[in-house]
Each structure stands twice: as structure tokens, then as C-alpha cells.
Image (cartoon, rainbow, N blue to C red):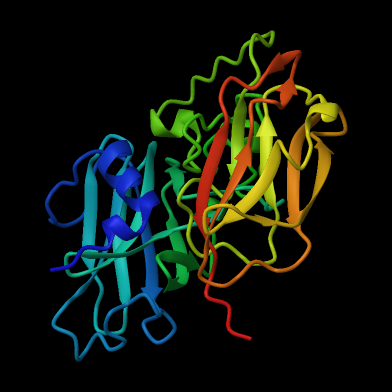
Amino acid sequence: METIFPKIKIYSILFAALFGTACGIGGNLSGPSSKTMTGNVDTAASSSLMSQSLADSSETIIIKATSASGAEVSTTADTSGSFTLTLNADTTYAVSVWQGDDLVGTLIFDISADGNFTTTAFKVDDDGGEITLGAIICVNGACQATENPLRFNDRDDDGINDFEDADDDGDNVSDDSEEDSDNDGISDDDEADDDNDDQPTSVSECKIIRVRPFSGETGFDIDHEVRVRFNAEIDTSTVTSDSFYITYGGTNLVTSEITFHEEDGSVVNELRLEPTLPLLSLTEYTYHVTDDVQCGGFALAAQLDVAFTTENHDD
């Protein structure tokens, strides 16, 4: 049976390299502290599904939650697309939808209410209760839910849900500035399933800590801008159309406008690139940040090249 993995880079990285080899399908996790997650896969609106009718399909719809350690919990959706999973507390998960043995897509959502960056991972708190995702629609390998799973967790117990909380793990580093060294949309702390974030007190190098879209992201909005955040103040004189740009089809340049942004009104540490016209539908693009860019008094250690694919946008 044909697999979707070679076609969608992010998923092969996410499930094979990052989260480890998946365990066999076999019911829900249980433990001393857990949380229920419910949802409904909207097959009528999900164009990524190979069969629009669950009742007529021999391939069942499976929902998997894979932890950062590689442990997996999965369940089969009923004929209406509804499902229930029980997730262990204090554990980071990515949720994916499968049709039989084929990956349909992974759930992608904003890491905070400001909508600056997206992710595929969330950490379950230990207060019990339920994560209610609502309807899930999968299009071109990317799944979106009516409700963001971060709304149902408060990992630092400060009374603010993780979606509304700008620093949901309470480590005094904003969610937008949590380092994501491999640019896959998941902070390094969550990949290690460890919130011990020892940030350096001084900058010894210039590096990129967060990007949007993340590497291999699919279903990217054709009207959205590219965002790249650095660990230190950017030398704006080093940022030009030759050092920060978007291409497609190999060498075709996308005419874009570069803007500079400050975190909390302090220093300029984020670049944004906004195409002058909407991007093409269902097209792979790559944005580039060359090592000519400097921040914190240092040149970027290595050029960044991030590929992503746009949404299916029907006029």
C-alpha cells in the first residue's frame, strides 16, 4: 500500500526521527493521573481522507497520540468519526489521523493566542478533566481542530490556560522564544519532555530559535507571512532581499517585503517576510536566511533553508 510519508517531510521527521518508532495499536494509556481527549474527524470536509465515507470504507480511521518518548496511544473512530483517548498527565503528545496504515495528517495549532507560531505538540497537565477538540478537518496532510488543545491545559498551574498564557511552562521564557533548534515547530524542551530550560545569561552566538512555517509544514495559508525569531538583537543592516527571501520551483524568487519586529517592545529579534501577492495554492516554497545576517554581534552560524507547502485555496 502506498505510504504518505515520502510525500510529507514533517511527518517522517516527526514520527520516525523525533518521537521514535511507533508502538502497536492497542487501546488507551492509563496511569495515576490522566486526561480524556475527545473529537470528531469531519470526513465530509477532509479532502486528505482517501474515502469520504467511513461507513463505506474498508479502511478504518485511527487517531494516534504519540509522546516525546515514543509511547503511543490510539483508538479507532466510530462511523460518525467520533473518538475518545485517555492521555497520561505530564506528557507531551502529537496527535495524528490515519486511514488504515496511511497517514492522513498531523494536528497543527497555534502555540499561543497571538498566533505568531504554530506547533504539533502539547503537554497534558495533571488536573484531570477533558480536552475537547471538536471537529477535526484534514486537508493536504494538515489537520486542524475547532478547539486548540492548549486551551484545556495549564502546565504551570497559574490559572491561565496554556493557549492564553504567554509562558505556559513558567520558565520565564515566552513561548514564542522557546528554542526550536531543528525548526520542526516543537520547542526543544517539549521534544525532550523536560521543562528545565536553562537559558544562557549572555549571547555567544547568533542563532534562530523559532520559525513559522516550520520545516515541512503543509496547508500554510497563502496570505500568511514568514516569521523568523533570533536569540539576540538583529543587526538590521545585514538583512536584505539577498539575505532573507522566498523561492519556489528551484530559483524563482517571490517578491516580498521585509519588516522588523520587537519582542515586548525591547529589541528587534524577529524578521518577517510578507509576499506582495498571495502565494500559489498547493505549491512548495522555501524561505532562506543566509549567514550574512548578524545578531548579538555574531554572524548566523549557518544558512537556514526551510521548505513548506501552501494550502489548497479555491477561489
Q: Nearer the viewer, residue 250 or 77?
A: 250
Task: Tell me where residue 199 sits by quadrant.
Answer: top right
**Left or right: where does residue 92 sit relative to residue 291?**
left
**Residue that lies at the very extreme toward the front in this rendered image:** 251
Quadrant for the N terminus, please.
Answer: bottom left
Task: Tell me where residue 222 sits by quadrant.
Answer: bottom right
Q: Nearer the viewer, residue 257 or 70?
A: 257
Q: Position of residue 292 (x, y in %)?
A: 70, 26
Q: Nearer the viewer, residue 304 or 210?
A: 304
Reply above or below: 232 against 229: above
Query: How many discs appear?
Result: 0
In the rendered image, is residue 164 in sight? no
Reply above or below: 243 against 200: below
At x 61% / y 41%, what residue is drawn?
A: 288
Q: Position of residue 211 (x, y in %)?
A: 60, 41
Reply above or below: 65 against 283: above
Task: Tell me where residue 224 sits by quadrant.
Answer: bottom right
At x 23% / y 41%, what residue is drawn?
A: 71
In the rendered image, is residue 42 in sight? yes
At x 72% / y 51%, what residue is drawn?
A: 114
Reply above or below: 154 against 37: above
